[in-house]
Structures are given as structure tokens and as C-alpha cells.
Image (cartoon, rainbow, N blue to C red):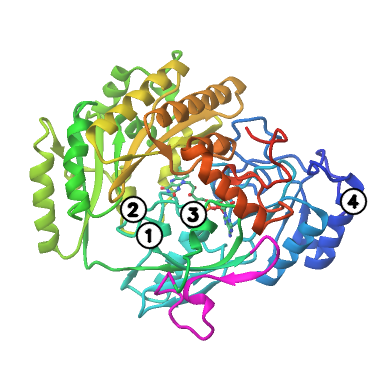
Amino acid sequence: KSPGTGQRLLVIPQGIEQARFFQAIEELGQTLGVENVEVNDKPLVDGWYMEHPNTHDMMPILDDEELVASAVVYPSDTEEVQKIVLWANKYRVPIFPISMGRNLGYGGAAPRVRGSVVIDLGKRMNRILDINPDDYTCLVEPGVSFYALYETIQAKGYKHMWIDTPDLGGGSVVGNTLDRGVGYTPYGDHWACHSGLEVVLPTGEVIRTGMGALPGNSTWQTFPYGFGPYSDGIFSQSNFGIVTKMGMTLMPNPGGYESFMYAFEKDEDLEALIEIIRPLRIGSILENVAQVRHVIQTLAVKGRLRTNYFTGDGAIPEEIVHEHARKMPVGDHSWLYYGMSYGPEHIRKYKLDIIDKEFRKIPGARRIDPKTLPEDEYFWSRDRIAAGVPDLVELLWVNWVPNGSHVAFSPVSPIRGTDAMKLFNMGKRLHDKYGIDFFPAFCVGLREMHLIVEIVFDKKDPKKRKAANDCLRELIDDAAKEGYGEYRTHLVLMDQVAGTYGWNDNALKKFNEKLKDALDPNGILAPGKSGIWPARYRKRGWEL
Ligand code: FAD
């Protein structure tokens, strides 16, 4: 295929002549096979979650053509990844690795630098290399999805092992874990649960971390640290290497489980609820990363357009949300707590009794009996997810507006009632200011919580995109002034978020830049990812 002959203008990375770029692409085709190198010169097609593009962000908050690849390549093994890296160094072409590219809300499959060559690792590197039923571990390549891992374990009849899955099961175990994604069993902190990486460095060498560095070891997936400095951390949310294999621990089947849900009447109940949650969570009476979701999400996750409820301007009025919530099986409420108790019945009962006694201290708190809920109620999706069964129901709230897209604001805070209320009020004020519906959900980790606020917007409406972007930028700055930082962010917000981690005259940023320049002297690997720019790009107007 000769580049530049499609129906869309090919975006060539800045700083390289067109003829030289075409020559480079041709050489890459000769190395990997022409069928494994695709130039991005066709119209951009967004598809949907399961048939997502690997050429651009299908949920853009800037112009459609802003975050686009020049080409996509499909390596089949670690050696081919090395060849791509050496090729990128030879031609100074920026490359951007994805495992599966379903990072929706954070940039999808798009590269940070326009015209980068996306390395789609998942298409051909999708093998489950090992599942160890004695150690409860596995070793996977980037293209293994949560669905694939779950289904393989079921097919092997390993009923004694569970996986942990995020809300959507179509993502990559490696990609989600490297972005420090979250699931909802006690193994929900994916990064904390991984053990061992194989990484191709930006100059082409391959390393194995932890015990993987010891030839002949049989503990790569059981002891994550090995000997000496623990290097795994620098390969997550970074642009210091391309991960080609990752070990993951699996959860033992707890011998029973039971989902539960409580409703709380008022927005202000959040403060007392979070105070009650903290000791129960730290003490593992509340065992999983549960979600505390606001009433508007009860409506949105029905999958209907907001115009079914409200056709006026600005954010949907609270009384309308409550009027419709009242008619739903869960009844009216401000907050819903979705949790799960694990273990045989007598053990669950011990924990559930404590939780019940504590939650009912909040006036008007109600336990909703799952037996009263229809099969299609969202509760049952959370029930599957918290039992490690991949699901897709969570996608429904993206249909809240036409051409539904979303982008997340995800600050970390202590598990404190005052912090929860401060963030809630800040979010509400700024969403009202920009006329955006406010979707807050608190995901409570062990000693901190992530507030996940999803801004759902119509991607075909430039004004809505701008409002989403402006609102997020103000949220990030206001939150930082109060001491809250994001745990993860969208590609276009990475510079701003990285800038909020500026203690001691940006000492951390300087450290990251030193690492970047040492590991990637030509600055070819994912320039700008997480706000880390290689020397070649620094202070040349790339930051957003
Ligand atoms: P990818 O897109 O492949 O990768 C993610 C990031 O890691 C990218 O920045 C990429 O550059 C980098 N990366 C990937 N692979 C490599 C590699 N091999 N080497 C180096 N860098 C690499 N996320 C959650 O965590 N929890 C949730 O509960 C959740 N709920 C969601 C609900 C909805 C409705 C939607 C739309 C999204 C949700 N997400 C959630 C976000 C996202 O869909 C998942 O995190 C998803 O798993 C990420 O996509 P991926 O696994 O395909 O990773």
C-alpha cells in the first residue's frame, strides 16, 4: 500500500520530511510485513467500545484531527517490538504503544503527539502465556482482555480462581494495570496485584523486572520485588518503556458472596456516610472497592437520553432527577452504596450485621433488598463485576446525550466526610457554571478514595466539547489549590495535571525528565505522556 493515496490527508509527524517518512514506512513494512503496517489516510471512523478505532480518540474534546496517528503497526512478539523501537530511533519518528486502546475517557487509542506511529500490541500479541492454578497467578501479553482471561479460566474449569475486572471487561489486563486502573473485588488495585514485567526500553534493550531478572527462577509471578531498586513503578503511566509481558495475581474463590445496596436520602448524608465507611474499609469489614453513586447516575445508567427527562438549558434540575428516581425500583435517594461481602454465609452475616448497624446510624438510610429488584436493574451488573465477571452494562450512561462521549476528572482524597463534601460542592458549583450535568461517584480504596466525575458530552457539538474542557481545567486547578490531585487523566490534560505535582520547584518533574533523557535520548517513545517531554520537544510549544 503506498502511503498518502487514501481519502484523508495523512498526518506526518512534525520534523520529518514527507518523502523520508514514506521511505521509513516502507522499510517498516519490509521488516514486519506490509500487512502489519497501516497508514492512517482513511476517514476517521469512531465505531463504539467493542469496535473502537486504533487511529484516534473516538471521544475527542479537541478537534477530531488533533490526536491522530500517522500509521498503526502490529508486532507479533517482543523481538518485533524491539525492531520498531530501533526503526523509530533511526528515523526519529514518535511512537505510542497501546495494549488494546480502550482507554476511553482518558484518550482512547490516541497518541499524545499528532502523527505518532501507534504500536497496537494487542492485535497479535494476545496470548495467555501461563495460568498457574497452584500459585493463583498468570502471565499475559498486552492483547489479553479481562473477558479473555475470565473465559480461559472458566474453560479450564478452574473454579477456585477469580479475576478482577474494571466496570467494562473489554479492556486489556496489561493496559488497564499500567494506567493504574481499578476493579471491584478485594484485588481491585490492579497495579498492586501485578507481579513482574518484561519491558522493551526506548533504545531497544529488553529487561525483565523483579525475579524475572534471575535466569531459571520460578517466582517471577509470586514475588514482585526481586533484588535492588524496584523498577516496575517507572513503567506505569509513563513513557519509559513498552511492556510486552506482565504477571498478575488471581484471587481465590472466597466460597460465597453477596451484594448489598443502601440508599441515603440527602446529598449532605455523604459526610456522615464517608466517616462511617473509613474504619470499616480499613478494617476490611467493607472488603471491596465499592462505589457510592449519586442519584443522577441511577437515571443515566438506564441508557436513555437526558431529553427523556429534561429538555431545558443548563444542568438538569435536582427536583426532576428525584421525581424520576421515585418511580424506579430503587426508589428516591441521593446516594446509593453498592458493596459486596465475601465468604461463606456465617462469615458474611457477621460483617453484614456490622455494616447494617453502622449505615443505619444515618437517618433515613435504607437497605434495598436485592430480591425486590428486576433482572435488568443496574445492581446486578455491579453484582457480576464485584464477583470478577466481566460486563458491559456500565456503557449505558454514555448514551445520556447524542453522540455520547465522556472525559473523567478523578481526584484522590482522604476517606473523610469533610473532603467528600468539599469535592462534591466544588464539582457541583463548576458543573452548574458550565451547564453540565454532574455525575459524581466515590470509589473507596483502602486508605483513600478516588472521586470519579464523568463529564458526558456530545462530541459533535464544539460548544459542548469546549464546556467540558473548560470545566475540567477549572476543576483540576481548584482541586489542586485544596490539595487534591488526579490519579489519572486524559491525554490533553496531562501537562496541567503533572504541573499540579510541583512540590519543591517541580522536583519530581525534573527527576522524570532526567530519567526520560537517559532512557530515551532521541525522545521517540510517547513524548508528552503524563506531562513528561523529552529534551527534543521541551519548551517548543507542545504543552497544552
Ligand atoms: P490501553 O488503552 O491499551 O492502555 C492504557 C494506557 O496505558 C495508554 O495510555 C497506553 O499508552 C498505556 N499502555 C498500554 N499498553 C502499554 C504497554 N504495553 N506498554 C506501555 N504503555 C502501555 N477504567 C478503570 O480502571 N476502571 C473502571 O471501572 C472503568 N470504568 C469505565 C467505564 C466506562 C463506561 C468507560 C467508557 C471506561 C471505563 N474505564 C475504567 C476506562 C477504560 O475503559 C479502562 O481503564 C480500560 O481498561 C483501558 O483501556 P485498555 O485496557 O485497552 O488500555
User: Mark 4 and mark 1: span between their CA atoms?
Assistant: 46 Å
SS category of the residue bearing label 3 = helix
What distance separates the C-alpha of mark 4 from that of mark 3? 35 Å
Does the Cβ of the disc 3 residue fall within 8 Å of ligand 1? Answer: yes
**From mark 4 to mark 2, how far is it between C-alphas?**
48 Å
**Mark 1 → mark 3, Cα distance in angstroms:** 11 Å
Mark closer to the chain start, 2 or 3: 3
Between the residue at mark 2 and the residue at mark 3, the CA separation in whole angstroms equals 13 Å
Residue behind mark 1:
164
Query: CB at mark 2 closer than 8 A to ligand 1?
Result: yes
On whether residue 255 falls in the magenta region, the answer is: no
> Would you name the residue on which mark 4 appears?
20
Neighbor class of circle 3 (other Cα within 10 Å; few <14, some 14-19, many 20+) is many
Q: Mark 1–mark 2 contact, CB under 8 Å?
A: yes
Residue carrying label 2: 184
N-terminal of the pair, mark 4 or mark 3, is: 4
